[in-house]
Amino acid sequence: MPSDAAPDQSAADGYLQRAHLLAELGRYDEGIDELTALIAAQPAHLEALTMLARMQLAADRPAEALAATETALTAAPDTVPALVARGLALLDLERWKAAAATADGILALGPADAYAQRSAAAILSASRNGQAALDAAWRGVELAPDEPEAHLVLGLVAVRLELFDLAERAYREALRLDPELTGARQDTGVVRLERRRYAATLEDLTEVVDLTPARVDPARTEDAGLRRLLLSAAGWSLGAAVLVAVLAPASPGASRLLAVLAAVGAGLLFGRPAARLPGLRDAMARGLAPAVYAAAAAPLLLAVYALVGGPWPLVGAVTAAVLAGVTALARR
């Protein structure tokens, strides 16, 4: 697309969806290419600029992330997600004073916003620390007591302040709400960027001070690992099915080829890891079997579409992917 031809909303959404899907697969450079194409046509596209900054952070390129946030904040100075990305980039660049000032701005903008409060608390704890960081972390918990990230940040702030009892209680509550946090530092993508950073930092700090994290029921851990894999597989199949459906009217042959590649990719990315997952049969017996079967059916239906064409295999693939995701979430 020429840079002087602004895409319509549906085309812009397509860029964002492709970038998001690529990022969740850890293919950051390809996702950045999608966003760069959109930003070339719409230089002030706030969502694209913010996602670009988060992608650059995930790819360990804080200077590029900071540049993207500065462009975003020029267009919309009071946007909390862009400010959070700016604060994280400044932390990675070890510009502590500027990071703390950014956190102060976030606190002022979102006194009733749980995401703003916990994000500012985390940035403050790494840049300046002190009572303001602890107050913001507590406020984040008060506003969103059921969100594990809020307790994770409280634990992070507490351990840096050497409030070890509080840190351990907060970490235990975060794990109770989401046992998957035990493997959060291996996550990819931008949706869970902060979660991944906070969990990794807290684990590192707890090792230094010799805190013992809360013990998690092995069955819950097995279920959590399978759920995470199922959600990734469902997202892959759903995104692939939508892309195939969009491509089908204009180029049936290309859409069938894409369906084959998506089905094979799903098998390679998710089938073999699922088969090797500890406790797979036990987790299925505990109520995850429908999600497993639905997740397996979605790429098979994409392969059926590649062979016979027609809309119904694609409808089936979308339905199976959605069913897998919804069932996996419902069994938490």
Image (cartoon, rainbow, N blue to C red):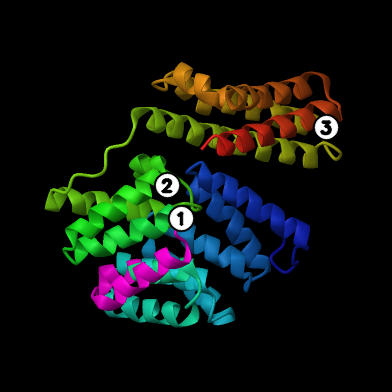
Q: Which residue is mark 1?
A: 147
Query: SS at mark 1?
Result: loop
Q: Residue at x 36, y 73 (%)?
A: 136
Residue kind at label 1, given as amino acid type: Glu
Q: Which residue is mark 3?
A: 252
Q: Is residue 300 left or right of residue 90?
A: right
Q: Which residue is mark 2?
A: 177
In this rendering, the label closer to the viewer, 3 or 2: 2
Residue kind at label 2, given as amino acid type: Leu
Q: Earlier in the sequence, mark 1 or mark 2?
A: 1
Q: Earlier in the sequence, mark 3 or mark 2?
A: 2
Q: Is residue 244 left or right of residue 96?
A: right
Magenta stretch?
122-145
Give the Cα distance between marks 3 and 2: 45 Å
Give the Cα distance between marks 1 and 3: 44 Å
Q: Is residue 303 left or right of residue 235?
A: right
Q: Residue at x 38, y 32 (%)?
A: 221
Quarter of the image containing the N terminus? bottom right
The question of residue 102 being in magenta is answered with no
Residue kind at label 3, given as amino acid type: Pro
Q: Residue at x 28, y 80 (%)?
A: 97
- Contact? badges 1 and 3 (CB < 8 Å): no
Q: From the top left corner, tell me how far across and down residue 230 is, in percent.
A: 54, 32
Numbered disc total: 3
- Contact? badges 1 and 2 (CB < 8 Å): yes
Q: Is residue 299 above or below residue 93?
A: above
Q: Nearer the viewer, residue 313 or 104?
A: 104
Tell me if residue 264 can be seen: yes
Q: Earlier in the sequence, mark 1 or mark 3?
A: 1
Mark 1 neighbour class, 10 Å CA radius: few under 14, some 14 to 19, many 20 or more:
some
Mark 3 neighbour class, 10 Å CA radius: few under 14, some 14 to 19, many 20 or more:
some
In this rendering, the label closer to the viewer, 1 or 3: 1
